[in-house]
Image (tube, grey):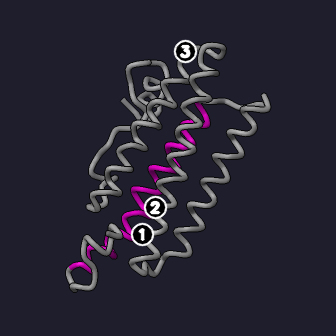
Amino acid sequence: MNSKDALTDSLTSSTSDIVVWGDKYATGIKLIDQQHRELVDLTNNLFHACLDGEQAAKPAFMEAMHRMVEYVRFHFNMETEMLERIKYPGFSEHKKLHETLIKQILDAAEQFKEGKKFVPNHFVRTLKDWVFGHIAIHDKFYASYVTEQKKKGLLNDKMINGS
């Protein structure tokens, strides 16, 4: 089965999830990985809220979108604080990536609330691609930095977690 068929199957089956947690998303930082797993669950909830038909899906989608927006904000704030605390050299760029995604999510949520042309399935797929692409690529950069700094004895879990 090619990837297009897999995507089509995932969009037509209410039992399929749009994203599944895997090692490609793991950073090795326990708190971050727990939050990323929560993002997987929220993304799947948002996706499933799209599958029940427009009238049935709208309230469920709005609730799922609200939860997703709030959790993404919480996670990005926590992650940004951690990156600043550990003096990650790519901090500014990473923070800008977070700000861009938050703006895109908020803009899409506002368009949906205002009844403008908005396709929830398209939004969820875009969100999935952006969030999990970000995790699989950009978060791996800081994960490597953390691993390297820990090996050198310059970072420890207490410093990373802020406790």
Q: Does the magenta segment cover residue 126? A: yes
Q: As shown in the figure, which amino acid type bears the numbered disc 2?
A: Met
Segment tinted magenta in the rendering = 121-150
- Left or right, 47 with reference to 110: left
**Is residue 124 found left or right of 2 in the rendered image?**
right
Q: Assess whether residue 84 is covered by the magenta stretch.
A: no
Split into 4 quadrants, where in the image is the C terminus?
A: bottom left
State whether the magenta stretch is mostly helix, strand or loop: helix
Q: Give the label on residue 82, or none.
A: 1
Q: Kindly identify the amino acid type of the residue bearing the numbered disc 1.
A: Met
Q: Which residue is mark 3?
A: 52
Instruction: Name the N-terminal-most of marks 1 and 3.
Output: 3
Residue at mark 2: 78
| Quadrant of the image occupied by residue 162 | bottom left
Q: Residue furthest front?
A: 163
Residue 5 % position (x, y): 44, 27
Q: Are marks 2 and 1 in contact (CB under 8 Å)?
A: yes
Specify few, some or many for label 3: CA neighbours under 10 Å numbering under 14, 14-19, or 20 or more.
few
Q: Residue at x 67, y 53 (%)?
A: 103
